[in-house]
Image (cartoon, rainbow, N blue to C red):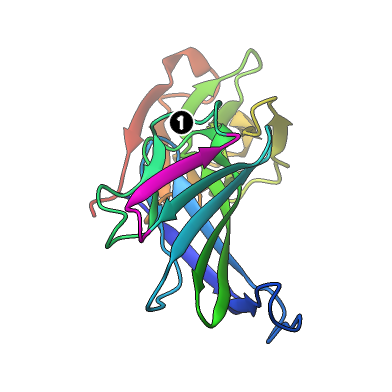
Amino acid sequence: MKHRQELQGHMWRSWTPFHTSLSLSPPGINRVSADLGHSTVMTCPNNTNITMVTWKISPKTGGQCILAYLIDQNKTERTNCSWLNSRINWRPRPDWDRALEIQQVGMADEGNYTCEEVNADGNFHLLYHLTVLVSPRMALYCDDHGNLVCEAETVKPAAEILWVPESNSTPRADSHDNGTVTVLSRFSASSTSGKNPTCIVSHATLNETKSLACFTHSVIKPDLLILFLHVPHR
């Protein structure tokens, strides 16, 4: 399971209608990111004597779905969740683990997720914003003019591309309808100065920088270019 989390803000508490409305602190957001196709888990506030727990699921597209667990009845309920599939659900035992699990995270899962716990002291909330990350598919090839082209395809967020030796190429980013980006950078064959160029790709999903290297027998005949993928040992 790949799961990244950056905590920003604080948990906040609101009172039931039987109490005076009060906010102890501004509502905070736990910013969570998950790799496409992997799983992620979001937890609830750690309170005792809970009578009910709800998860409010609000993706970027679609309406809000509410999952509720009534502890005294040991029963779960769903409201406006006809679109929700089994990938997003309680952990196997909501009576002792009130976390929400998303299996095989997809692009459509991006959005806000709020856990609310109720006990005699009031209602306690924990808000998450989920961002889906997409790892780059890397490619290195020659264009029709003999220039090296390095691509990081369908990534999210956009990858950073650098050249060694340094090139004055300005990367181009093409956005896709699904929210991913393809970043492309060209290295002029005349700029090699006898050195074998390397394309270096950095991205949030990579534990370390990946590089694509190539050897040229002749910068005059780019058809003799030999390409290979090099990934540093972890």
Q: 181 above or below 119?
A: above
Q: Give the vertical position of 84 relative to 33 (above or below).
A: above
Q: Position of residue 24 (x, y in %)?
A: 68, 87
Residue farthest toward the right in the current orientation of the protein: 21
User: Left or right of 81: which side holds 51?
Assistant: left
> Quadrant location of residue 207?
bottom left
Q: Nearer the viewer, residue 161 or 217?
A: 161
Q: Residue at x 73, y 42 (%)?
A: 170
- Please say if 228 is above or below 27: above
Query: Residue 142: where, in percent of width, then height?
Result: 55, 20
Say which quarter of the image contains residue 25: bottom right
Task: Specify the quadrant of the image occupied by residue 129.
Answer: bottom right
Q: Residue at x 35, y 61 (%)?
A: 72
**Does residue 73 sit above or below 103 in this rendering?**
below
Q: From this viewpoint, is residue 208 visible? A: no
Tell me the magenta residue range: 71-80
Name the residue at 52% across, 53% down: 55
> Is 88 placed left or right of 168 in the picture?
left
- Total residue callouts: 1
Between 59 and 122, the one lying in front of the other is: 122
Examine the structure image and report whether residue 73 is included in the region drawn in magenta: yes
Task: Work out whether residue 114 or residue 38 is closer to the camera in this orientation and state it.
Answer: 114
Residue linked to disc 1: 137
Element class at badge 1: strand
192 left or right of 90 in image: right
Residue 49 spot, x, y in % from top left: 38, 77
Q: Specify few, some or many for label 1: CA neighbours under 10 Å numbering under 14, 14-19, or 20 or more.
A: few
**Amino acid type shown at disc 1:** Arg
